Image: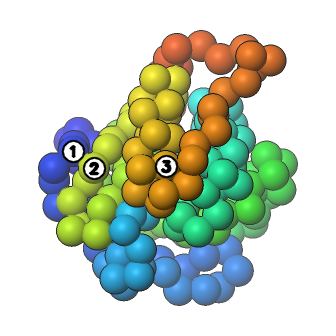
């Protein structure tokens, strides 16, 4: 199975965050033009590399819902967020049912879901140009002028393939 692509219907998700709050994708899309979902596992070095940039997006677009979707337990997800300074919510997909519904084979995998419940962008692994395009898309959707996601001080490769996702047992 391959991660869902642009134009596909995004499956609804109803997950609990590390702080015990409930999150529902379709419910949130009633209030927001987009939601960004970023699937990860805490042992993935590419996730370690990408998530600080997703935090930059979160700080640039504070009203935009960005949700990490962790394939690990709550303690591991909390430690990951602390280690990398992530302030957006981490939702728990320990049984991987949401990961399977989205066709996750590698992490990180990021989806931009529109209010029509269709996937507007899919990024598998780390892809600098895709993240730059995502930044422009978010600026257009939110009406907030975009800042460059990457600075000249960042040593950023064009691509880094993701890590194999956890698989359901």
Q: Which of marks 3 and 2 is nearer the N terminus?
A: 2
| Residue matched to label 3 | 139
| Discs 2, 1 touching: Cβ within 8 Å | yes
Q: Real-space Cα distance between discs 3 and 2?
A: 14 Å
Q: Is residue 6 visible?
A: yes
Q: Quadrant of residue 31?
A: bottom left
At label 2, counting other C-alpha atoms closer than 10 Å, the crowd grade (few under 14, some 14-19, many 20 or more) is many
- Residue 78 percent location from the top left of the image: 75, 63
Q: Residue at x 73, y 24 (%)?
A: 151
Q: Real-space Cα distance between discs 2 and 1?
A: 5 Å
SS of the residue at dot 3? helix
Q: Which of marks 2 and 1 is nearer the N terminus?
A: 1
| Residue matched to label 2 | 120
- Seen in the picture, residue 144 relative to 1 is either above or below; the reply is below
- Seen in the picture, residue 5 relative to 161 is either above or below; the reply is below
| Residue matched to label 1 | 6
Q: Real-space Cα distance between discs 3 and 1?
A: 19 Å
Q: Can residue 43 be seen in this view?
A: no
- Residue 103 percent location from the top left of the image: 27, 49
Q: Which residue is drawn at 16% across and 53% down?
A: 8
Horizontal side of 131 relative to 3 (left or right) equals right
Q: Quadrant of residue 1?
A: top left
């Amino acid at each position: 199975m391959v991660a869902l692509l642009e134009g596909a219907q995004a499956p609804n998700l109803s997950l609990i965050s590390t702080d015990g709050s409930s999150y529902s994708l379709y419910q949130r899309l009633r209030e927001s033009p987009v939601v960004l979902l970023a699937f990860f596992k805490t042992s993935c070095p590419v996730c370690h590399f990408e998530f600080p940039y997703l935090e930059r997006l979160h700080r640039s677009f504070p009203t935009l819902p960005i949700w990490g979707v962790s394939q690990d337990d709550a303690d591991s997800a909390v430690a990951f967020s602390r280690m990398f300074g992530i302030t957006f919510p981490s939702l728990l997909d320990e049984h991987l049912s949401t990961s399977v519904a989205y066709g996750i084979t590698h992490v990180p995998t990021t989806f931009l879901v529109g209010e029509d419940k269709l996937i507007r962008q899919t990024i598998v692994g780390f892809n600098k140009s895709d993240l730059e395009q995502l930044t422009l898309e978010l600026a257009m959707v939110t009406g907030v002028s975009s800042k460059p996601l990457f600075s000249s001080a960042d040593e950023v490769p064009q691509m880094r393939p993701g890590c194999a996702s956890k698989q359901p047992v």
